[in-house]
């Protein structure tokens, strides 16, 4: 199997760095192929606009989705985006590895999505959710937090981790067709002792060894919605 | 009153551009002062790392929050971040104006938060939520969407807009102490006729005229949580 890890942390020696390093070792050790996009090391530019394209559809007014669809038709994406698109097509499983910054993706990773998940390539023409482009592929989030697990409980101070990750898990990954596995969350990593960190790395390795057997998170299917995009029956 | 609009759209002629232009006119016409950070026009760099600082606390290992706290103590933020921090302190109301990209902030705006809302300056030492740094200030989101309103209903295809915006409204704005007003959402703007766009601009102007009288969104207060950061009583 082919695994694509998109890694977003500015410090190579960080626990996020250790998680990605350990993931590569574990997966390669199990006979899988791994590619890593280390966004900070690549100096990935997360700002989405005309810089995404070598092509131009409308020079007078930038409508990003229109330019994306056009670029997809005429092979008009810049090489650094095409390289990421190739890795997405190549992979059987996508892993986004990041620290939770302001309850979301670090900007460098949000911009990787903004730019790489372009209309035409990643969605469009009725291809979304369970009819999405990447249907058949798996995806999961590898997340580290500052706060502890109780503060991310359903009645926790910051709100339920599932709700906080919903825009990413449902709105990005499932939208594009991925089967989303439960997130791997390492809580409050700055406060962990060395032995606890080793335990977290081993827990991560165990998750990765079972990647192909795990049951994805349940989200409704397009067939569950009416023509007005509302659920046919109460959830 | 002082209003700070942070604007994140790459096309000046866009409907987002019209909303920000109309907001400035409306607010200034009512005697308020307005500053706009037009992030694309400013070529704002959204990537957060050592580039945020002129100071260095630990040159061997980048722990972003530690460097932020140190920079706050020694006046070590780079000038473009200090300028944004000054506008945050100056304002009585913060408006984030953006198109919903992948169910979240465009990366250029997420990175504005990642970099400007630094530990020490925007939170830390028990200053969060209703004891937050910006307590007493108001904030609201001005959002445009691709999808229509039904798909963002509680039983809608994309999920409830309140849930999608929760990480921003609760996790960023309320975390830093802002009283969060209900979001202004212009649905499916690409499909609007000219007359409908005028109506949306007028609806926005009406919201802005009532900015100081509106009831904020209700979120629990720190006093509602126990020492383990769980609600004392069921929500």
Image (tube, coloured by chain):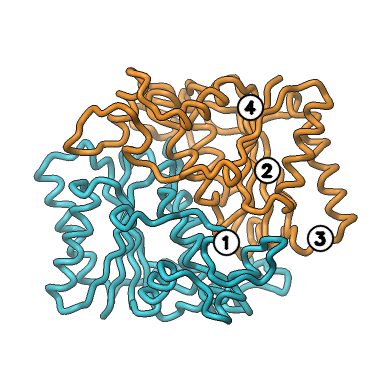
Chain colours: A cyan, B orange
Between the residue at mark 1 and the residue at mark 4, the CA separation in whole angstroms equals: 34 Å
Residue B170 in sight: yes
Residue drawn at (57%, 61%) of the image: A50
Between the residue at mark 1 and the residue at mark 3, the CA separation in whole angstroms equals: 24 Å
Q: Position of residue A185 (x, y in %)?
A: 30, 52
Residue drawn at (57%, 75%) of the image: A71
Mark 1 surroundings: few (<14), some (14-19) or many (≥20) residues within 10 A: some
Between the residue at mark 1 and the residue at mark 2, the CA separation in whole angstroms equals: 24 Å
Residue drawn at (28%, 45%) of the image: A187
Nearest to the eye among marks 1 and 4: give it: 1
Q: Label 1's element? A: helix
Mark 3 surroundings: few (<14), some (14-19) or many (≥20) residues within 10 A: few
Is B120 positioned to the left or the right of A1 in the image?
right
Residue holding disc 4: B138
Q: Which mark is residue B142?
A: 2
Mark 4 surroundings: few (<14), some (14-19) or many (≥20) residues within 10 A: many
Residue drawn at (45%, 68%) of the image: A218
Is B203 positioned to the left or the right of A166 in the image?
right
Nearest to the eye among marks 1 and 2: give it: 1
Q: Position of residue A195 (x, y in %)?
A: 9, 45
Q: Which mark is residue B192?
A: 3
Q: Label 2's element? A: strand
Front one among B136 and B74: B74
Between the residue at mark 4 and the residue at mark 2, the CA separation in whole angstroms equals: 13 Å
Do tag 1 and tag 4 residues touch (Cβ < 8 Å)? no
What is the quadrant of the C terminus of chain A in the image? bottom right
What is the quadrant of the N terminus of chain A in the image? bottom left
- Subunit under mark 3: B
Q: In the rendered image of this protein, does residue A20 appear above or below residue B107?
A: below
């Amino acid at each position: 199997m082919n695994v694509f890890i998109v890694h977003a942390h500015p410090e190579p020696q960080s626990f996020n760095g250790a998680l990605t390093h350990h993931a590569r070792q574990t997966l390669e050790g199990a006979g899988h192929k791994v590619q890593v996009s280390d966004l900070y090391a690549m100096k990935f530019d997360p700002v989405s606009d005309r810089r995404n394209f070598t092509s131009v559809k409308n020079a007078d007014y930038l409508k990003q989705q229109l330019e994306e669809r056009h670029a997809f038709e005429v092979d008009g994406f810049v090489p650094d985006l095409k390289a990421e698109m190739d890795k997405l097509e190549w992979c059987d499983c996508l892993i986004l590895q990041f620290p939770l910054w302001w309850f979301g993706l670090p900007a460098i990773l949000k911009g990787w999505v903004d730019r790489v998940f372009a209309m035409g390539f990643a969605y469009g023409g009725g291809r979304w959710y369970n009819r999405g482009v990447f249907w058949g592929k798996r995806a999961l989030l590898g997340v580290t937090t500052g706060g502890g697990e109780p503060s991310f409980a359903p009645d926790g101070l910051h709100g339920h981790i599932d709700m906080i990750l919903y825009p990413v898990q449902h709105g990005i990954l499932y939208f594009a067709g991925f089967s989303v596995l439960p997130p791997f969350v390492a809580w409050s990593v700055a406060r962990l002792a060395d032995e606890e960190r080793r335990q977290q790395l081993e827990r991560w390795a165990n998750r990765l060894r079972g990647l192909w057997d795990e049951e994805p998170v349940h989200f409704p299917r397009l067939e569950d919605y009416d023509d007005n995009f509302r659920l046919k029956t109460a959830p």
